[in-house]
Image (tube, grey):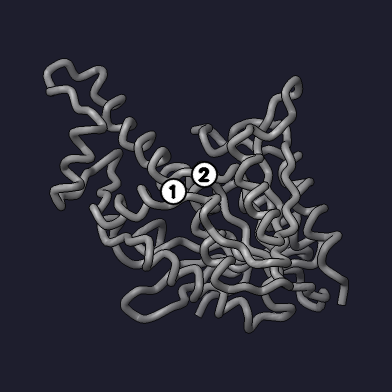
Amino acid sequence: MSTPIGSSDLQVEPFFFGPPRGRLFAVHHRPRNGAEVRGHVLCVPAFNEEMNRCRSMVTEQAKAFAAKGFGTLVFDLHGTGDSDGHFRDARWADWLDNVTTALGWLSGQPGGVKAILGTRLGALLAAQAYAQRGDPHCALLLWQPVLDGKIHLTQFLRVRMAAQLDRPDLPKETTTAMRQQLAAGEAVEVAGYEIHPELAHALDHARLGEQRLFAGANVLWLENASADKPELPPVSVSALGEWRAAGARVDGQTYTGPAFWQAHERVLASSLIDKTTAWLDTRVATP
């Protein structure tokens, strides 16, 4: 039995949920006892090391949500973090089931599910789960979303190549060679993460713009931009246009601040948290 911890404004409760042989670790952030809960947000994490680099930002966002009356569930996907399993066991379909399970748990909490927040590759997973859920009373929040899973995986494979630059005694590898290994049914290990061929195949076919959102979907899309060029990139504008054509209400915005998903040290993008909090606050009625 877990014990809630926290201050007068916020309670934080770590716990496990899900089936006995596939338990998922989660941290439930919620407003203090007695406070009116307006609803909950589910956070879908980023991929591998980006997940670890984003943790402080997600925690700060949960605190900001709590100040506005929202609870937040932060959880680890199967085979990642403190959840059961090893990364080599990870499959995209299982991760999607994990999100569905987490949404089911949150649906039973006061106020139900008001939003799904996906960060980086988690934005792809969140969008897919959101499209399947089809709930117009729930919003989709995307932080620095990955648009193309294949490109994202290729960039991750290059981490292994970079690690060999100071090892002239080792044969040089290429992403082509690693992909051939995956195509042959062999796992590839990168920075301690053993990627199964089935997961790699799913990532290669994952495109954010191809997630068919329903008419009435409510989406906030936030990307980092420089002060002298505050516009969203053309590829993002194109994806947003496809969703709008399907009847979704999409708000594409930029923010300025550090690229927290890339930084090894703890950094905060306060403007991102402020914009996310304000957007959700104005779209959910107070009980």
Q: Nearer the viewer, residue 10 or 179?
A: 179
**Image: 258 above or below 214:** above
Write down the residue under mark 2.
146
Report x, y in % for residue 140. 66, 60
Q: Residue furthest bottom?
A: 108
Residue at image x 54%, y 71%?
A: 132
Q: Nearer the viewer, residue 34 or 191?
A: 191
Q: Looking at the image, is mark 2 or mark 1 nearer the viewer?
A: 2
Q: Quadrant of residue 116?
A: bottom right
Report x, y in % for residue 218. 72, 61
CA–CA distance in space, label 2 to label 1? 10 Å
Tell me if 79 is positioned left or right of 109 in this view: left
Tell me if 193 is positioned left or right of 247 in this view: left
Report x, y in % for residue 70. 75, 67
Write down the residue under mark 1.
47
Q: Are marks 2 and 1 in contact (CB under 8 Å)?
A: yes
**Image: 228 above or below 160:** above
Q: How busy is the neighbourhood of tag 1: few (under 14 within 10 Å), some, or many (20 plus)?
A: many
Of the residues shown, which amino acid type is indicated by label 1?
Answer: Phe
Q: Quadrant of residue 92?
A: bottom left
Residue at image x 73%, y 64%?
A: 10
Question: Number of marks in the image?
Answer: 2
What numbered label is drawn on residue 163? none
Q: How busy is the neighbourhood of tag 2: few (under 14 within 10 Å), some, or many (20 plus)?
A: many
Asked whether the viewer can see residue 72, the reply is no
**Image: 37 above or below 88:** below
Asked whether the viewer can see residue 21, the reply is yes
**Does dot 1 land on a helix, a strand or a loop?**
loop
Residue at image x 68%, y 30%?
A: 225
